[in-house]
Amino acid sequence: RDAAPIGDALTKVERADIAPSVRLLQAGADDNGAFSTIVHWAHLFIGSPYRLMGTSDEFFKQLTYRGKLTSQLWREGFDQGLSGRQLSEYVARKFDEGFAPSGRFTNEQAQQYAREVTFTEKAGPITTALQTATSQAPVFQLLLPFVRTPGNIMRRTFDMTPPVAALSSRVRADVLGRNGIDAQTKTMGRLALGSLVWMWAIDKATSGELIG
């Protein structure tokens, strides 16, 4: 009803929740049905872009979370030596436990993966500082309506650029395996992909096929 996210609280939409103010206006206009209707439809119209963005974000986050959770549970079942009906029942039971009664995600690993795929993970220190500044001075939101998602995209770009990524203590720790095998594998894969893209771009640029 209020376009609130279901699975995860972190979304691409970064704005103050105006729904309580709208309900207050409607409550104060109970004796004027026309005005209450105008407020309601104005709220829906003004907030429609945010609702559309929130809907798409929720769709892809649900899709990614469920896929990651399912693959993780099948792997866990195989590691425990389960097979056949026992394995299917284990996956089904654990899958249901991956959601709270409210629909919130409860599996931290799958939730983090879904956030990374949609670029809605927790922001770094610089992006967090910008978020704090825009929240304290709402007028800045006219210039920077979205902070966390663009910041995460830029950080992902840096993480996939080997010379720049080497400056990050987090990336170095991932490569050395200090944050676990999953983080190491993921980071090494991103660096390999980034290296291929940069080598392709440099080759095309030196041959004159890539300009601008």
Image: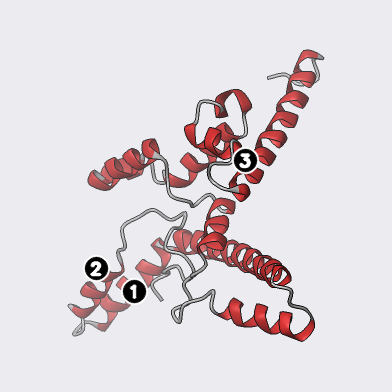
Image quadrant in which you'd find residue 208: top right
Q: Position of residue 119 (x, y in %)?
A: 53, 49
Q: Tell me the crowding category of disc 3: few under 14, some 14 to 19, or many 20 or more residues within 10 angstroms, Cα based.
A: many
Labels 1 and 2: the sequence-earlier one: 2
Q: Tell me the crowding category of disc 2: few under 14, some 14 to 19, or many 20 or more residues within 10 angstroms, Cα based.
A: few
Labels 3 and 2: the sequence-earlier one: 2
Seen at 26% across and 83% down, the residue is 33
Q: Is residue 3 left or right of residue 188?
A: left
Q: Position of residue 42 (x, y in %)?
A: 36, 67
Labels 1 and 3: the sequence-earlier one: 1
Q: Quadrant of the N terminus?
A: bottom left
In front of the other: label 3 or label 2? 3
Res 40 label = 1
Residue under label 2, please give it.
21
Q: Quadrant of the C terminus?
A: top right
Res 153 label = none
Q: Position of residue 84 (x, y in %)?
A: 79, 82
Q: Mark 2: which amino acid? A: Ser
Q: Mark 1: which amino acid? A: His
Q: Are marks 1 and 2 in contact (CB under 8 Å)?
A: no
Residue under label 3, please give it.
187
Q: Under tag 3, what secondary structure? A: helix
